[in-house]
Amino acid sequence: MGSTKKKMTSTNRRLRDRSRLSFFFVIFFFGLFSVIIIMENFMPDTDKNSLKDDNEDGEEPYTNSDISYEETLDQEGLLPSGNTDPKAKGSKNSSNNGHTASTQKPRIIPIQPDWQPVTGTKEKFYVYSAYYNHLFDHVKIIGATRTKTQQRVKCRFYDNDTRVYHTVDGTVRTIRENWNLKYSACFIICYSGDKKRRPRYVSILPSTASTTTPASNILRIQYASEKSDRLVDFSVCVKPIHFNYDNLLPLLEWIEFHRLMGVEHFTFYNSTIGPKVSCLIEHYGEEIIEILPWTLPFVSQKEIRTEGLFVALNDCVYRHRGASKYLILVDFDEMIVPRKTHNYTQLIDQLDTLSNKKKIGAYSIQNAFFYLQWPDDQKGFTIPGNPLAEQVTKHLLSLRKTRRRARLHPHKQRSKYICDPEKVVEAGNHFVWEMATGYYTLSVPPHLAALHHYRVCEFGGDQCTKNPSVIDKSSHIFAQALAIRVAEKLQQLSTKCHIDISQLFYSKPSSRSVV
Ligand SMILES: *[C@@H]1O[C@H](CO)[C@@H](O)[C@H](O)[C@H]1NC(C)=O
Ligand SMILES: *[C@@H]1O[C@H](CO)[C@@H](O)[C@H](O)[C@H]1NC(C)=O
Ligand SMILES: *[C@@H]1O[C@H](CO)[C@@H](O)[C@H](O)[C@H]1NC(C)=O
Ligand SMILES: *[C@@H]1O[C@H](CO)[C@@H](O)[C@H](O)[C@H]1NC(C)=O
């Protein structure tokens, strides 16, 4: 009896201890979770603050125009074979030995913002740019590789003195729009892990690389928080310029139309550009037109879609985070024309009343073909006291070409969009493939704005001109203002770029005004 009682009390005691222990555990984990939650909530803020503080410490903020700069690099397995700079070759000895030759002088290596190879990977692999995302504390690298890829890579992070401090695995994800070609644009996501140390550069290496493997590429990481203080309202991005594009007057019209609409900044990619257009771009200056090198290491249309445009479009979206409120992704033969308002600021204000504006990430605008084969609108415009501008009105595409296909294409088919770059995760040519959680694309009603698309038949020949058509003069409300701007620029360019204005008017506009 007594022993049974003893057993029972000892069992009770054990039970009691256990429940006390569980209680303790509950309290412990509750505390732990609270700490985690508190940290999650406050870390992004402290992170942001620390970025700001760094800026105030006088570190040169990275600006869009900062496209060719030099950085001091030390010897830790950095660069490269494959880099064009002969000075870079000096790193061979130290990296082969596998130790840091700290006695060697730091080298100056220009970091070109252009395509750079990732050597040693299974498939052809190139990278173009790198962007920090403070929400997820990761770096997104934009590049291109095999469409159906299962490659694994490493991301090597460097601090501001280009000392290697961290290497992590990176996840490669090809973007959705690839047209069944062998190579496509891709993102590489690398979590930087250490919130206190802000990575300044990153290299992508094959997963087999060791700590002494030299990197064949190095990208400066761009921070939205380091862009200029003032957000530009509207910027335009255009896919890489190729075919030695040199169509001066149509481009001038296109640029000045956009400036009239309130666009302040343009981002272009230079694949091949003709001399007159190059001169025009330089004339505007980098404050207005940012031109980025684009030495694409893939065969356009055979290996990768149109000059790797999806790399450029996505690069442009991330590049403009923290720099532009709205981004417009169009080609040189396209203009988004508002029909009830006088500029894009007013258009956006109008569109924002249609829906919950806080949830709009992009505005989709339907395509309207104005086929170039259709005859010109004969009427010019009178501009008293400005004969050049008056003459210009007879030559501007948007004023001459007023016949359009009656039926507009539905949204997502040849449509283009205006977006908030912060809200776009993956950009496509005609619509946003992936939007930040909680945001959507507003389908703009065609009576408020349409995409005027000036080109020849999309499938060749003249068959397209048999489609039902209507006369649409909605662009004529800008006629005088646009012609005056174009005439003024033409006068400036004629001396600077040696352009014979009368020659411009006599030469028949090329049917290939498509970029
Ligand atoms: C590399 O090593 C070779 C032979 O050991 C030497 O002649 C050369 O100067 C070294 N180069 C550098 C950059 O250290
Ligand atoms: C690098 O960053 C540290 C602080 O993070 C700063 O003290 C140092 O001056 C920076 N060096 C350069 C070269 O900007
Ligand atoms: C847009 O048009 C309105 C009305 O004409 C004008 O007040 C405003 O300044 C314009 N905005 C820009 C950026 O041109
Ligand atoms: C585009 O690149 C070519 C070749 O590198 C160069 O000659 C030309 O000046 C560039 N144009 C502009 C506007 O940067």
Image: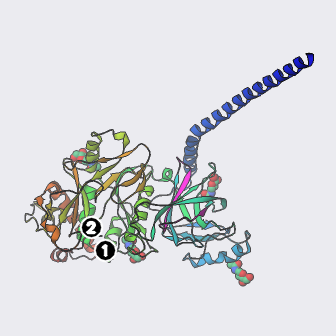
Q: Quadrant of ligand 4?
A: bottom left
Q: Judging from the image, what secondary structure is the residue with disc 1 in?
A: loop
Residue furthest to the right: 2
Q: Which residue is denoted by mark 1 in the rendering?
A: 245
Identified at 41% across, 65% down, the residue is 178
Q: Is residue 331 left or right of residue 389?
A: right
Q: Judging from the image, what secondary structure is the residue with disc 2 in?
A: helix
> Where does the magenta region start and end?
134-154
The percent position of residue 145, horizontal first and vertical second, equals 50, 68
- Relative to 228, is 377 above or below? below
Q: Is residue 18 left or right of residue 87?
A: right
Circle 1 Cα neighbour tier, 10 Å, few/some/many (<14 / 14–19 / ≥20) = many
On residue 251, the disc is 2
Give the amino acid at mark 1: Tyr
Quarter of the image for residue 206 reads: bottom right
Q: CA distance from mark 1 to mark 2?
A: 10 Å
Sequence-wise, the earlier of marks 1 and 2 is: 1
Quarter of the image for residue 513 reads: bottom left
Front in this rendered view, residue 279 or 512: 512
Whether ligand 4 has any atom under 8 Å from the Cβ at mark 1 is answered as no
The percent position of residue 32, horizontal first and vertical second, equals 67, 35
Give the amino acid at mark 2: Leu
The quarter of the image holding the N terminus is top right
How many discs appear? 2
Quarter of the image for residue 253 reads: bottom left
Q: Is residue 73 left or right of residue 409?
A: right
Report whether residue 160 is seen: no
Residue furthest to the front: 1
* Marks 1 and 2 in Cβ contact (< 8 Å): yes
On residue 227, the disc is none
The quarter of the image holding the C terminus is bottom left
